[in-house]
Amino acid sequence: MQFDDPKGTWLHVDPDTGELLQTKAAVDRTYFLFFNEIHKFDFYSVRGLAHELIVWVLMLLGTAISVTGVWIGVKHLTKPPKRKPAA
C-alpha cells in the first residue's frame, strides 16, 4: 500500500495473512537504491541481459576511473620537483 503522507510511506503486507512485513519511507527507498543497487550491483528493477549490461558498463567505468587515477598519481610522483628561482 502507498500512502500520500509527507514521508511517502509504503507498507508491504502479506496478502495471505494480512501481516505487516515492512514499512518504508521515501528516504529508506532512496538509501536502498543507492546502497544495494549501486554498491552491491543488485538491480532489483532490472533483470536479464539488461542487468548484465548495466553491471559490465559500471564495472568498466569503475576500472577506467581507477586506472586513470593511478596513471595521474604515478605521473605526478615521478616528475622532478620544481625549484624556486634564487632571489
Image: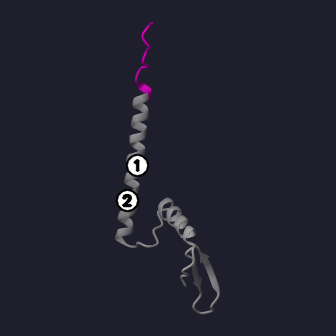
Image spot of residue 54 (x, y percent): 38, 63
Magenta residues, start to end: 77-87
- Labels 1 and 2: the sequence-earlier one: 2
Taking the spot 55% from the left edge, 64% from the top edge, the residue there is 31
- Indicate the amino acid at tag 2: Trp
Residue 55 lies in quadrant: bottom left
Quickly name the residue at label 1.
63
Is 56 positioned to the left or the right of 15 in the image? left
Q: Residue furthest top?
A: 87
The tag on residue 56 is 2
- Indicate the amino acid at tag 1: Thr
Taking the spot 43% from the left edge, 45% from the top edge, the residue there is 66
Q: Are marks 1 and 2 in contact (CB under 8 Å)?
A: no
Image spot of residue 41 (x, y percent): 47, 63
Q: Quadrant of the C terminus?
A: top left
Q: Main secondary structure of the magenta part?
A: loop
Residue 27 lies in quadrant: bottom right
